[in-house]
Amino acid sequence: MAAMILGVVSGWRPVSLGLMSPLRVLTLVAIALSWSSNMAADGPRALAVGQHPEDQRLQPPKDLDGYFPFQPPATPEIWERRATQVRQRILVSQGLWPMPTKSDLKAQIYGRIDRGDYTVEKVQFESAPGFFVTGNLYRPKKIQGGKAPAVLFAHGHWADARLSQATDAELRNEIATGQERFLEGGKSRFQSMCVQLARMGCVVWQWDMLGDSDSQQLSRQLVHSFAKQRPEMNTTENWGLYSPQAEAHLQSIMGLQTWNAVRSLDFLLELPEVDPQRVAITGASGGGTQTMLLAGIDPRIALSFPAVMVSTAMQGGCTCENASLLRVGTGNVEFAGLFAPKPQGMTTADDWTKEMSTKGFPELKRLYGLLGGADRVMLQRGEHFPHNYNAVSRTAFYNWLNKHFHLGQAEPVLERDYTVSSRSELSVWDDGHPAPMAADPQFERGLLKLWTADSNRQLESMASASPEQYRQVLKVGWDVVLDARDPAPASSLTWVLKDKQDRGAWIQMAGLIRNTSRREEIPVVFCHPKQWNGKTVVWLTADGKSGLYTTAGSLVPAVQQLVDGGATVLGLDLLHQGESSLDGRPLTRTPRVKNPREAAAYTFGYNPAVFTHRVHDVLTAVQYIRGHEKPSSQVSLIALDATAPIAAAARAQSGPALNRVALHLGEFRFGRVLDIHSPDFLPGGAKYGDVDGLITLGQSELNSMNTSDPIAAATWVMR
């Protein structure tokens, strides 16, 4: 314990609390040797027995079927800042911050079919070494003006989409209800789109979603139907997708699909006939999700048309549409807003998008108007149709593309019938191009290992070559991982005194720090000396505020020494600790959404981790102290047990609000947590240097340690 307080262990630099004389510090250290958490009593209460804080975080977590409204900003400047934050959230959640190394695509184009006014070809390329993207390339036979516009077509959740054809019964029903027009061309809505765009003079790339058609290196069950954690994949080495380690490194199916979309755009722009100023993306359902994300993060896209997906309601039900961190505090309408003021269209159907005309689209229209582009966003309503990308919706896209890419087509642009290509004509794998091994667990592990190594290599190189750039990359990453929040308005932080006792030389005050702007309440106790020296120490323990007390009800010796030395000590019950616990017991498994599928993204894609909430509690307490009418000359933080990672994260987020931090991380690493519902589980926690990255971020610019030793860096206590 002495080593914990002074920070003197192998490779640690001594840390002065700056609260008392060296003799008194040594006395504190000696007394602390006998202190342990099992000495803690219940401590003073802020609430009556059986009562809980009025804290919205104690409610059931939000899920993908929640309500996701969008509030347009007041000014373009406010939106610019917000849009940057949301883009960074997307990139971080997808494992694309920083962007992975772009290796040679090794694209192969072959199997050309000549259809008179357009051609169809087979394509395969490697988005990462050994990881294949497959699809078909449609090209016009004649290109006007030297360069052709291009369209990326993401197909969504229709099984075997690119290679599928409707049955006779399905097609007749769609023709009868006005969804399709041709007995031949109507067999494939996917080919219909590509053929018509090629006839309009566009180069079109349609690629396979993972686990679909020719993309079978990861199985359809794994990609779209994952339901139960796999113990054999939940290891600290050679882990698989959906494991705690994959989540801690921000590796997901959705991230892989987003990466394939980025590389698909790279592939299109390598074609010499493509006009880089006129590249569009469209897709419906899950393809609409891919459309929103790529359009939102990649400035090379000039026009976006996400169909039947932009909504304030359901956000995407498949595992391939969900990633941890992605929709915390945001949602699909705001994702679509990232594209403003560039041309964007969208459609509705008799599904979760049916209220878009009154909930979501008016707000998007106001955003576009704010940015000077009110006429560059449109909604094609189709609530009388089921979930679709039918001929009516496709025509809306053709008209929108024709208008903004100046294609010169007579409107409305109508499809003409065509000869549907067979599976064998479109399938990428053949005798001359054998398919890679399908659904191999070793491939899955190897792909994530490659992904991890590339990320680590980039960060290490950056740390050596450009420390400032490295810190900035870490800051953005950790800001998303820890859901960094702007300080609450001073008026929203209030103190509610519940109990006050005179303990002789000091006063004990139990109550609540209330954050009304976020509907949060933190039970706390202040141990305030009557002869206060102006310094305050926030002391975290695994037992919450009761950890400041012995079983006899007196302060533990180390805390007593701080109070005797003139410092105020604050103990608090972090979320799900002490009085912030609904059942009064220590938290062993964090809350999860009702969705029975054991994919972390269903919970942590919409809600911060418990760990993150606890960091927020610390920051709220520190902000309250700093804003108090009797300001502290120095605020310090001590965490000597399992709360040390929380303290490290709070220090990294606190800026100058904390002057001193003493903590003991021991062997803890986020990358070693083996349960997605452990209180220590943190999506993204291992991506940016793990706890070492937090320590690096928390270093004061005036008092940083120049070292490459991660242990020394991880144990540096900052001013």
Image: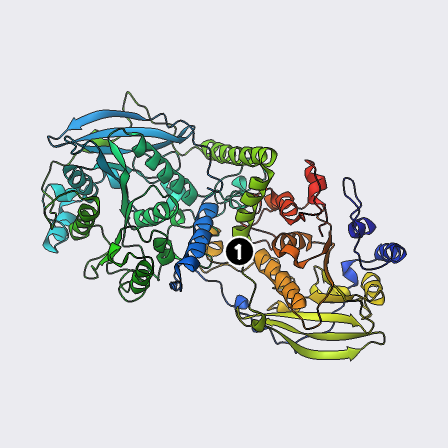
Q: Which residue is mark 1?
A: 483
Q: Which of the 4 image quarters holds residue 628? A: bottom right
- In the image, 284 versus 676, the foreground residue is 284
Write the residue at 65% across / 43% down: 692
Q: Which of the colour schemes (rainbow, by chain, secondary structure, one colour) is used?
A: rainbow
Q: In the rendered view, does 595 fall on the left or right side of 362?
A: right
Q: Relative to residue 64, is residue 268 depicted above or below?
A: above
- In the image, 53 versus 11, the foreground residue is 11
Residue 60 in sight from this viewpoint: yes
- In the image, 106 versus 490, the foreground residue is 490
Q: Position of residue 687 (x, y in %)?
A: 55, 43
- Total tally of numbered discs in the picture: 1
Residue 235 in sight from this viewpoint: no
Q: In the rendered view, does 437 fall on the left or right side of 700?
A: left
Q: Relative to residue 484, is residue 459 depicted above or below?
A: above
Write the residue at 41% across / 42% down: 222
Q: Position of residue 103 (x, y in %)?
A: 43, 29
Q: Which of the 4 image quarters holds residue 422? A: top left
Q: Relative to residue 130, is residue 705 depicted above or below?
A: below
Q: Position of residue 697 (x, y in %)?
A: 62, 47
Q: Position of residue 704 (x, y in %)?
A: 70, 44
Say few, some or many: other residues with alpha carbon within 10 Å of mark 1 (under 14 / 14 to 19 / 20 or more).
many
Disc 1 on helix, strand or loop?
loop
Q: In the rendered view, does 136 fall on the left or right side of 320?
A: left
Kind of residue at disc 1: Asp
